[in-house]
Image: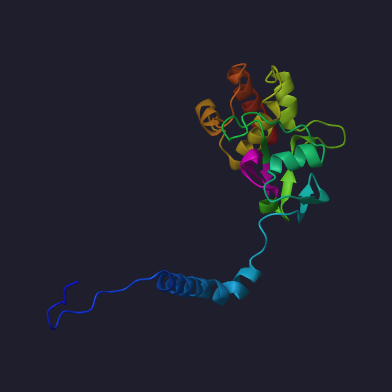
Amino acid sequence: MTTPPEGTPAPLEIGRRTVLKAGAAGTAVAALPLAACSSTLESVPPTSGPREVALRVNGEVRALSVEPRVTLLDALRERMGLTGTKKGCDRGECGACTVLVDGRRIKSCMTLAVMQDGREVTTVEGLARGGELHPVQAAFVRQDGLQCGFCTPGQIMSAVAVIEEGHTSSDAEIREWMSGNLCRCSCYPNIVAAVREAAEEVR
């Protein structure tokens, strides 16, 4: 082995012990932020496990314990037995699951039950009063807007909101504001006629 010239720095010697020491130091540094944030993490509510929810459904307070992932649609149908609201596409495209939340129509398959905690929910079962059909329900019967009936609850709930919103000045306007609800039977002329008739009755 030859001697290096004078002034040449000594070669860096990295042994197994040096690597282990460096790894332990890195792990300790990486753990510092987690330890510092532990008190913050403890204050975040758990994202899993049942949550207590209270909804006013069709005028009645319903308390239930649900997983955070349960949709409002499934809570209504499977936990409360309100099967009038239909599960169609289950991705917000067909409108069969339309209900009213605080008077506004929403697709219940696209929201979680825990997100609606404390709100007022109206389903198709909550429209009739004292054994009498809601004017929109009665108009759907008279105009034969029911057809197979699968989309009908969502169509009726949407129609109730469309009338309340004042979007019934023409058939074109009714079609536009009812366009989020699909009918596989293509019963659209009858549905539009029913909405127009019910709007005239409600006014």
Q: Nearer the viewer, residue 63 or 151?
A: 63
Residue occupying the point 20% across, 79% down:
9
Residues drawn in magenta: 100-113
**In the image as oriented, which residue stretches furthest toward the right?**
130
Magenta stretch containing residue 17, yes or no? no
Quarter placement of the N terminus:
bottom left
Name which residue lies at 73% across and 33% down: 85
Measured as percent of width and height from the top left, residue 46 is found at: 67, 60
**Image point (55%, 71%), residue name:** 34
Residue 80 appears left or right of 69: right
Residue 48 occupies quadrant: bottom right
The stretch drawn in magenta includes residue 107 = yes
Q: Residue 38, relative to residue 62: is it above or below?
A: below
Quarter holding the C terminus is top right
**Within the image, what quadrant is residue 117 found in?**
bottom right
Residue 7 point in image, percent of width and height: 14, 83
- Horizontally, is 16 left or right of 90 in the view? left
Coordinates of residue 143 in the picture (x, y in percent): 69, 19
Q: Residue furthest left?
A: 5
Image-quadrant location for residue 137: top right
Determine whether 199 is above or below 14 in the image: above
Q: Is residue 48 above or below residue 190?
A: below
Residue 180, given in percent of the width and then of the height, sits at 56, 32
| Residue extending furthest toward the front | 1
